[in-house]
Image: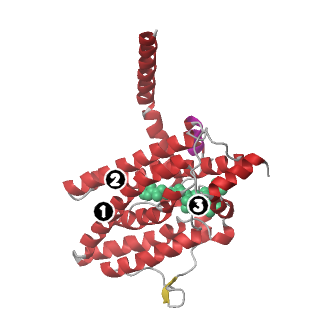
Amino acid sequence: MNSLEAQFEARIAAEDKIEPKDWMPDHYRKTLIRQISQHAHSEIVGMLPEGNWITRAPSLRRKAVLLAKVQDEAGHGLYLYSAAETLGADRDTLINDLHSGKAKYSSIFNYPTLTWADMGAIGWLVDGAAIMNQVPLCRTSYGPYARAMVRVCKEESFHQRQGYEIMLTLCRGSAEQKAMAQDALNRWWAPSLMMFGPKDADSPNTEQSMRWKIKRFSNDELRQKFVDATVPQAEYLGLTIPDPDLKWNEEKMGYDFGELNWEEFYNIVSGNGPCNRQRIQARKKAYDEGKWVREAAMAHAEKMKTRKESQAA
Ligand code: BYC
């Protein structure tokens, strides 16, 4: 280990934040660019399943809240792309990688949103899983990522509550509404658990990322925490978790739960899930239609720069 590496490791051990201009190992930089850009892509692809219901929200209040949530996700994408840029990543390259299918984004957004109850289940479960994963990332070792996560998590907790409130309203409503909530839970439960990533034994990146404090908990640890926190919430709603193997384990003071369908997970991650193609197509269309906005913004920035230069001269 050379002295730069030794200094870097010492700073990680001392819980210092690594900042953009600091020396860092190439692999640390690459791991962060990978994780942060996948996270950014997940946020902007994550706008699509819920965006699908904005025009069909059952009331003006529900519509305004859903709109705000989807806009928050666009904002999260922007902070995260900016954080990736501080590591030297080029935004156009990142976006091209998303469009070409080279870059990954969260598996969860490749499932369809079939009913209004899915807006409840996504807020409750998907944002709930996101919070479980992202609160520890507020302490991640890379400064710009950690700081972006603080705001993201505040907004995610509002998202989780709005989802749970939709579920609660449906569960206190008619028998049909409660059945709709149960159906959404049935479809979103296992995919939400898969959001945490492969089992630790099959996760190539966890060990090194935890050593560098990029990740603070392993995939399985976070999945377990999520199950333990969410089961009582389902009980309060009067809903049944769709897992016959779910059982309280007194010894570990947590729930045991059934094996997930990892074949389905890897199929989705490799681009062959129910909505992968549709999601990428929608992102490309939005990108093409936004070309004039990007051009206008760049032209404005250029004009401002020229004005400043001529004032300084
Ligand atoms: N889906 O070694 P592993 C949100 C990939 S946004 C797809 O465990 P790592 C929200 C993984 O990338 C949710 N791919 O990897 C937005 C790796 O691929 P490569 C996104 C997955 O990075 C809108 C390979 O599998 N959250 O919450 O140590 C509305 C091996 O895995 C998935 C984040 O991105 C998956 N589920 O750990 C509502 C949070 N899981 O590149 C909500 C930040 C794994 O090696 N990211 N892969 O080929 C992380 O914490 C970590 O990157 C992960 C994976 C826990 C996701």
Question: What kind of element bears circle 1?
Answer: helix
* Whether residue 58 is visible: yes
Residue 162 badge: 1
Q: From this viewpoint, which residue is outermost toward the bottom?
A: 250
> Is 205 on the left-hand or right-hand side of 16?
right
Residue with the mark numbered 3: 215
Of marks 3 and 2, the one in the foreground: 3
Ligand 1 quadrant assignment? bottom right
What amino acid does circle 3 point to?
Answer: Lys
Q: Residue at left 46%, top 44%?
A: 79
Q: Of the numbered discs in the image, which one, if any, rests on residue 298?
A: none
Seen from the viewer's position, the closer of residues 137 and 237 is 137
The x and y percentages for residue 233 are 36, 77
Assign the magenta stretch its main secondary structure.
Answer: helix
Q: Are marks 2 and 1 in contact (CB under 8 Å)?
A: yes
Q: Are marks 3 and 2 in contact (CB under 8 Å)?
A: no
Quadrant hosting residue 62: bottom left
Q: Is residue 194 left or right of residue 189?
A: right
Q: Is 186 located above or below residue 98 in the figure?
A: below
Residue 79 in the magenta stretch? The answer is no
The residue labelled by disc 2 is 69
| Rendering coords of residue 74 (x, y %) | 41, 46
User: Of the residues under marks 2 and 1, which one precedes in the sequence?
Assistant: 2
Q: In this view, does 151 lie to the left or right of 269?
A: left
Q: Which image quarter: residue 273? A: bottom right
Q: Residue furthest right?
A: 1
C-alpha span from label 3 to label 2: 26 Å
